[in-house]
Amino acid sequence: MPDFLFLEGTIIGLLELFLIAVGLSMDAFAVSVCKGLSTQTLQRRHYLIVGAWFGGFQALMPTLGYLLGSTFEQYITSVDHWVAFILLSVIGGNMLKEAFSKDEETADASFAPKAMLLLAVATSIDALSVGFTISEYGWLMALAASIIIAVVTFFICMAGLRIGKKFGTKLSGKASILGGIILIGIGLEIFISGVF
């Protein structure tokens, strides 16, 4: 069965996009776990709010990255694999650093738009790098990446809210470790594909 994402010369396929989506969603997952822990009574709307805010911004950032990357394509085509490798490695490294930090991760129980906006921006800013890496493949790839990232993040964050209510914050650190490793691995793969 043909996969429209595996275009000629394309280094990012469906599996890579899914892994990137999982990696990028781990910060939002960790925050969702904390939200679940700090909320006394979870309602159906809480799941939708968390999924929509985090998923929506995880889709918006790659789109912005794509638009910026397309605008400055002639300047970044020759170094895009370096940019992707550095950005994803730094982001992944920071996630690993935070995961092993002694500081307690805190989140309040507010689901108000102002609180969710700040959290959504903070946990999705790293997704800009995905837009840069796919800018040379056209709007269809950017759209596919944004949709996949949004859907994966939506469900992972809803699960995180439930897990936080059930098990507390013990899993949030492990999620950041997994996300960091995935992002560094994807960055390395993009770099190797771009160089060789």
Image: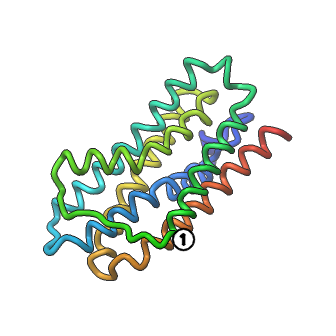
Q: Tell me which corner region of the image, top left, top right, bottom left or bottom right, holds residue 161.
A: bottom left
Toward the viewer: 166 or 109?
109
Toward the viewer: 96 or 144?
96
Q: Residue at x 46, y 48 (%)?
A: 148
Residue that carries the numbered disc 1 in the rendered image: 100
Q: Tell me the element at label 1.
A: loop
Residue placed farthest to the front in the image?
102
Q: From the viewer's perspective, tell me whether residue 25 is left or right of residue 179.
A: left
Quarter of the image where the C terminus is located: top right
Q: Tell me which corner region of the image, top left, top right, bottom left or bottom right, holds residue 46.
A: bottom left
**Residue 74 image offset from top left, x and y in percent:** 67, 17
- Kind of residue at disc 1: Phe
From this view, report whether residue 181 is shown above or below residue 4.
below
Q: From the viewer's perspective, tell me whether residue 97 is left or right of residue 52.
A: right
**Residue 10 image offset from top left, x and y in percent:** 69, 37
Q: Residue at x 50, y 38 (%)?
A: 128
